[in-house]
Amino acid sequence: MVNNEFLTPAQKEKYRRGKEVELADRTEFSYSAIDPQGMRANRLALIASVLIDGGLSYMLYQGLNALFNKTRDAKEAGFESPGYKNALIDMEDQYRRVPEQQKRAYSRSGGTR
């Protein structure tokens, strides 16, 4: 998912090939092997969600470079879509729960110190 929008198989294939992917909210992004962040977009920030080992992992990309051969409108680039805002809330909720899970963890030996 990107900004809480599931990618279609066609969008996933475009992303894998480094082509531009457009979401319903007009957010455009692509993968760039030469960019240190790996992502370029017409927005300044994106939240990507990946399903790993049965759980969602969130990645926040900030300060993204503009897409190749495109100028970026400063006002539009700073716009945070409702999908982005919802993904940010979900990501923050997930990270708030992490310490609670770690408190209940047991050591490998099972013994007390």
Image (tube, rainbow, N blue to C red):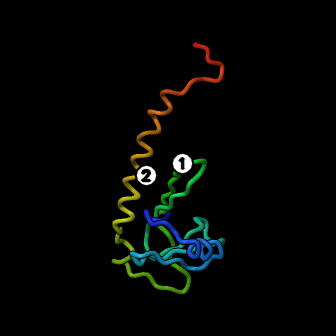
Q: Residues at badges 2 and 1 in contact (C-beta under 8 Å)?
A: no
> Mark 2 — residue?
91
Residue 28's place in the image compared with 89, above or below, is below
Res. 110 image quadrant: top right
- The disc at residue 55 is 1
Q: Amino acid at mark 2?
A: Met
Q: Residue at x 57, y 24 (%)?
A: 106
Q: Position of residue 97 (x, y in %)?
A: 43, 39
Q: Is residue 31 visible?
A: no
Q: Give the amino acid type for the residue marked by disc 1 in the picture.
A: Gly
Quarter of the image with the C terminus in it: top right
Secondary structure of the residue carrying tag 1 is: strand
Image location (x, y in percent) of residue 9: 58, 72
Is 76 situated left or right of 49 in this image?
left
Q: CA distance from mark 2 to mark 1?
A: 12 Å
Mark nearer the N terminus (2 vs 1): 1
Residue at figure coordinates x 39%, y 75% from the top left: 25
- Name the image quarter holding residue 86: bottom left
Residue 101: x and y in percent read: 48, 33
| Secondary structure at numbered mark 2 | helix
Quadrant location of residue 31? Answer: bottom right
Q: Is residue 67 above or below residue 63?
A: below
The residue lying toward the viewer, choosing from 12 and 31, is 12
Q: Is residue 54 visible?
A: yes
Q: Which mark is residue 14?
A: none
